[in-house]
Image: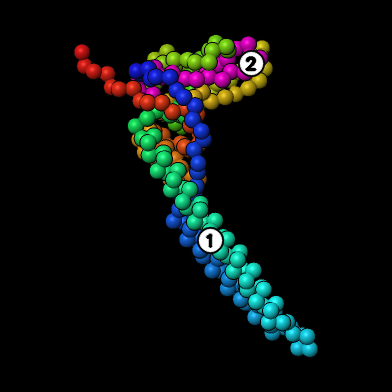
Amino acid sequence: MTPLPAAAPIPAAGSAPAEATRHTGRAGAMTSDFETFLRMLTVQMQNQDPLNPMQASDFAVQLATFSGVEQQVRGNALLEQLLARSDMAEMTGWVGMAVRGPYPVAHDGNSVELSLRPAAEATRAVLVVRNALGRQVAAEPVDPAATTLQWRGLGADGQSLPAGLYDLELLSYEGDALVATSIPESLGRVLEVRRGQAGLELLLDGGRTVPAASASALRAAAAPAQPG
């Protein structure tokens, strides 16, 4: 894999639910609440003490209070909608760039640079590799002090694994005791920014879909190699 220029930390991306569903749901909820309020107000009027009826001013206060709350909810909904659109517009610039995060690795036969976070007290470390079915296909020892590694995508038999997505996990041991586990970070090229159920998502090369907020670094993608 062609090395890429140094990465720069980025702030966590904002997130928002699917806009159409959220907005429609909130509008329906407010309509339901208003109908419930009117029913309660009608029952209150029917069951009030005829010798000591509620004053018209008290009804007006209740109506005004509910109206104020309703307007505040509508204002908050509009603000969230504007912020969500701003996030999406800002992140369209990520398309074509490379992001780094704790993602499944898209193995294509080339080596992949990993960023490791072994435990400080680790005396040995093991990189465990699982395929898309969750089955362990490799486990290789790594330097417990290393923070980067060129993963070559080799299986337990020393042969290159089939192309596809693989989940990697770094196990840190102190002696024979497991003291920490972590997910190595790798790079992925952004193909698309989309809005998912839990917020903004990134579609990466290899078919990976990850939360935008999980990205820890953003860098310019390397230019394709020119034929010699």
User: Where residue 150 sits: x, y (%)?
Assistant: 44, 15
Residue ID for mark 1? 74
* Residue 68 sits above or below residue 147 on the image: below
User: Where residue 227 sits: x, y (%)?
Assistant: 21, 16
Q: Amino acid type of disc 2?
A: Ala
Of 125 and 70, nearer the camera is 70
Per the rendered image, the range of residues in magenta is 105-128
Q: Amino acid type of disc 1?
A: Arg
Is-magenta flag for residue 132? no
Q: Earlier in the sequence, mark 1 or mark 2?
A: 1
How packed mark 2 is, by other alpha carbons closer than 10 Å (few <14, some 14-19, many 20 or more), is few
Q: Position of 89 compared to 115: left or right?
A: left
Q: CA distance from mark 1 to mark 2?
A: 50 Å
Of 5 and 75, nearer the camera is 75
Local SS, label 2: loop
Q: Please give the label number shown on residue 120.
A: 2
User: Where residue 91 sits: x, y (%)?
Assistant: 41, 39
Which residue is pictured at 57% across the width and 24% down the height?
Answer: 182
Tell me the quadrant of the picture where the C terminus can be found. Answer: top left
Considering every residue shown, the one lying at the far bottom of the view is 51
Q: Quadrant of residue 96?
A: top left
How packed mark 1 is, by other alpha carbons closer than 10 Å (few <14, some 14-19, many 20 or more), is some
